[in-house]
Structures are given as structure tokens and as C-alpha cells.
Image (cartoon, rainbow, N blue to C red):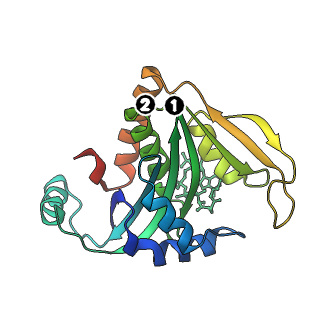
Amino acid sequence: MMYVMRPMRLEDIPQVVQIDRDSFPTPWSAKTYQFELANRNTSQLVVVEARENTDTSPDGLRAMWQRLRGIQVNGQLAGYGGCWLIAGEAHISTIAVHPNFRGKGLGELLLAGMLQRSIHRGGEYSVLEVRESNTLAQNLYHKYEYQVNGRRKGYYRDNGEDALLMEARPLDSGYHERLKQRLAALRERVPYIDKFSE
Ligand SMILES: CC(C)(COP(=O)(O)OP(=O)(O)OC[C@H]1O[C@@H](n2cnc3c(N)ncnc32)[C@H](O)[C@@H]1OP(=O)(O)O)[C@@H](O)C(=O)NCCC(=O)NCCS
């Protein structure tokens, strides 16, 4: 399998909404994604698309990349993420991986990709909310140096669970260097193309 990280498009919304329903008790609606996509100045929405690829050698990947350049084909979506960037704050608004694709490094790829682009666009720190019981996601955020720095009591309306507020700060040149190293390590595990870094 080969993965392509690229901006979300309107035609992705049905698959995104399905992954959302499989991932969250209170999923976003298709209308919310349409609104977010129309608001590109502050909202960054990305997807990871899965494609069959038999040749994962560097030459094979390069050849595939040549074929994909400029061509808009919709494959199966393996995951998506969203980030708002406002006044230096990169707020991870959502992140989810299709249940069949979890545990393969794709959640990490989505998070690292969004952080990298936020830094390029002036992000100085990053925040997010996570369910207190979602230790799996918290592990991912700790790996990217987020620390718990607050709590919202009863934040989740489906079960009244608290949200932990997590923050990674500062997203300075040292952080960016570590991020690049983590992305390089990830590339050893996950064959992917980053359409943003063209
Ligand atoms: C959270 C989520 C996005 C992670 O995506 P993923 O592709 O499965 O995760 P990855 O394979 O990229 O793993 C990244 C890190 O997450 C943590 N992690 C992943 N799976 C884990 C597991 N089964 N147990 C514990 N930690 C785990 C680890 O820290 C891992 O890093 P490592 O590989 O160095 O150990 C995914 O589980 C998901 O979609 N969950 C439902 C939606 C959700 O909870 N979103 C977060 C809302 S705040």
C-alpha cells in the first residue's frame, strides 16, 4: 500500500463523514466540512489516501509519483485531519484514521504534516482537546511534545466526559528540526507522498 497526503477536496466529504461516524460519538456533518473547506484562510483540512502499489522501491515510488502528478483521482481515504491557524495558534480541530488503517503510522503522519504546514504559515504553538479516556490519542500527542495544561469539565455532550487541554509550545526552529527527524523516521515505516511539499 502507498499513501498520498493532500488537501481535502469537496468530493472527499462522503468518505470523510463515514470515517468520522466510525470514529467519534458526535461526528461533524457534511455541511461542517463544506464550511471548513470554504474557509481556507484559517482552516487546513488534509486527507491521506490509500493506493495499491506493488513496487515500493525508491524508483517505483518515483514512477508512481510521476503518474500521480496533476492527476486528480480519488482513491480510498485512510484518514483526515483539520487544523485552524489563528494568530500563531495552531488548533488541531480533528484527526481520525479509518478503523482498517489504524496503527500503521497514519495518524502520526497527519498530525506531523499539519504541524509542519502550520509552522511554515507562522504557527508559534499548538493546542487541542482530547477526551480524558482517549489515552491512545494522548500517546500520539505526547510523542509530538504536547503537555496537558488544563481541563474542560463535562466538555463532551454525549457522556459528559472532561476534555484535557494539551499544548505543544514553542513550535520554534528546534521543534521544527525534531519534527523533520520524526517525519524522516516515519518515512522508513510508511511509504507516503506529501503533495504539499511539492
Ligand atoms: C488517534 C488516531 C488518529 C491514531 O491514529 P493511528 O494511525 O492509529 O496512530 P499511529 O499508528 O500513527 O500511531 C501514532 C502513535 O499513537 C499511539 N498509538 C497508536 N496506536 C496505539 C495503541 N493501540 N495503543 C497505544 N498507543 C497507540 C502511539 O504513541 C503511536 O506512536 P508509536 O507508533 O511510536 O508507538 C486513531 O486511533 C483514531 O482515528 N482514533 C479515533 C478518533 C480519535 O480518537 N481521534 C483523536 C481525537 S482527539
Instruction: Name above or below for residue 106 compared with residue 19.
Output: above
Determine contact: label 2, label 1, CB under 8 Å.
yes
Which residue is painted at 47% across and 46% down in the image? 42
Instruction: Name above or below for residue 92 compared with residue 87.
Output: below
Which residue is painted at 82% across and 63% down in the image? 157
Amino acid at the residue labelled 2: Gly
Question: Helix, strand, or loop for circle 2?
Answer: loop
| Circle 1 crowding by C-alpha within 10 Å: few under 14, some 14–19, many from 20 | some
Question: Residue 104 at what x, y percent from top left?
Answer: 48, 59
Of residues 117 and 4, the one drawn nearer to the viewer in this rendering: 117
Of residues 181 and 37, the one drawn nearer to the viewer in this rendering: 37
Question: Helix, strand, or loop for circle 1?
Answer: loop
Tag of residue 143: none
- Quadrant field for ligand 1: bottom right
Mark 2 lies on residue: 122
Mark 1 lies on residue: 88
